Image (tube, coloured by chain):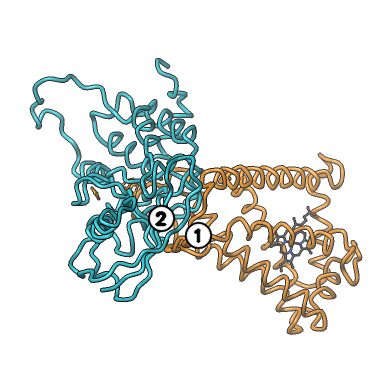
Chain colours: A cyan, B orange
Amino acid sequence: MNLTLRIWRQRGPEDKGRMVTYQVDDVSPDMSFLEMLDVLNERLILQGEEPVAFDHDCREGICGMCSLMINGEAHGPQRGTTACQLHMRQFSDGDTIDIEPWRARAFPVVKDLVVNRNAFDKIIAAGGYITAPTGSAPEAHSVPVAKNNADAAFESAACIGCGACVAACPNGSGMLFTAAKVTQLSLLPQGQPERYTRVIGMVDAHDEAGFGGCTNIGECAAACPKGIPLNTIGRLNRDYLKATSKRAGTPGS
Amino acid sequence: MAVTGILLVLFLILHMLGNLKVFTGETSFDHYAHWLREIGTPLLPSTWYLWIQRTVLAVAVLAHIGAATVLSMRAHAARPVPYAHRRKIHVNYAARTMRWGGVIILLFVIYHILDLTTGHLNPQGDPANPYGNVVADFAPERWYVTLFYVLALVTLGFHLRHGAFSAFRSLGQQTPKGERRARSAALVFAVVLVAGYLVVPFAVLTGLVA
Ligand code: HEM
Ligand code: SF4
Ligand code: FES
């Protein structure tokens, strides 16, 4: 396959950035999207040009590093698939493909296609943890968990923190990520002690980071490579309402 | 957003039911409009109830618009650099037209109050005879007025379809099964409400109400 790529190039955080067109020939349909970018980068290096910076780590859909907006779709056209697991067979010979970084104030561009997703870490630090004795693992059967709660918590725990929900959201909101992290813990017995301080802390950290407000549109869930369902946000809302009516948002109250 | 929206929805339901009274005839409809001004008498002076309701609605509308403005401003601030390739839209149209739809509905309400409440833009404009005002309003030769009402009401339908679902969600609807129910309920509600409003202009247009 021969492809035309239009890639966002930006030298650093201060650079204005622009779309640059590249031609990539002899792409195998069996290549992954990132391998195709590797091919381009090898050529750029041989030509003495600066290679395209893009994030990746596991290349098997579990780390959440690859963050590419491909033809206006977060992680590209295939549903439930990260960019690293996307194969070139999803495209056809002669296609023009636009590749951009996630666009959000809370995710500033570091270079080219690499953004800084530190805002997510701040949300986690504001409550995405439980207080548990460390050391040897406890006996698994000592705390029973209802099957449907375990399933729903597990579904939320599949979130890899990639940020596609923010990239796809017309409001630039990070609520699907925040909700996944809140409910993964609030559905389990281990998450109960901090349940209501957690939701307030994490939503506050989300808003402070400069993400937009959720208006229940649902683009996030459509873009999410891990299929985090939209109703997760309803679980967060329910906890948030309870927390504010209980005034449980202040530690110690 | 959800709480003020629910207040406005309650008004929309009552207003639709009130409008349907045109089918009970001129005296009954005019009497109804007169009664609206007398609710609460002799406990309250005449038209006080109406003014209380108008104040509550005005506050709800302003708060609703205020919340929408905050959300829009946050959304713009949250994405300072737009995408070069426009984001593909995967989900419902209704959710994506809330902001412009809201503006259209507001303009409609302003026009509508000048039309049927104050009578300034109404061909008859007789406060004592709202039935006659409605009939004069939607007369066949004033088809453009009817068309505007229809467009505004369809916009309202879209607004309500997403708005009602979104209100359920904001107030804590949380299960996948409940989500399917909430979406269907919102759709049915929007369709019934819009149909309930639209029968009035169409009844006048076709001569059923004259
Ligand atoms: C075909 C549809 C409609 C018809 C025939 C209709 C008819 C009327 C009439 C006759 C009045 C005057 C009542 C009176 O002064 O006693 C009125 C008032 C009003 N209508 Fe409608 N209406 C329609 C749709 C709507 C919609 C969709 C909205 C809101 C989105 C709306 C909002 C209002 C408001 C705010 C008032 C003023 C209430 C007040 O004075 O306190 N109407 N309408
Ligand atoms: S919710 Fe989905 S899209 Fe959002 S960060 Fe988690 S895995 Fe990525
Ligand atoms: S590189 Fe790890 S998820 Fe794509």
Mark 2 closeness class: few <14, some 14–19, many ≥20 residues within 10 Å = many
Image coordinates of residue B141 in percent, x first then y, are 82, 83
Image coordinates of residue A250 in percent, x first then y, are 44, 20
| Position above or below: B156 against B48 | below
Q: Residue at x 23, y 28 (%)?
A: A190
Q: Which residue is mark 2?
A: A100
In whole angstroms, how far apart are the C-alphas of marks 2 and 1? 36 Å
Q: Quadrant of residue B172?
A: top left
Q: Quadrant of residue B101?
A: bottom right
Which amino acid type is marked by label 1? Ala
Q: Which residue is mark 1?
A: B186
Image quarter (top left, top right, bottom left or bottom right) of the N terminus of chain A: bottom left
Residue B133 is left or right of residue A67, and the answer is: right
Mark 2 residue element: strand
| Position above or below: B202 against A79 | below
Q: Is residue A49 visible?
A: yes
Q: Is residue B13 visible?
A: no
Image coordinates of residue B87 in percent, x first then y, are 46, 60
Mark 1 residue element: helix
| Position above or below: B17 against B49 | below
Image quarter (top left, top right, bottom left or bottom right) of the C terminus of chain A: top left
Q: Tag 2, which chain?
A: A
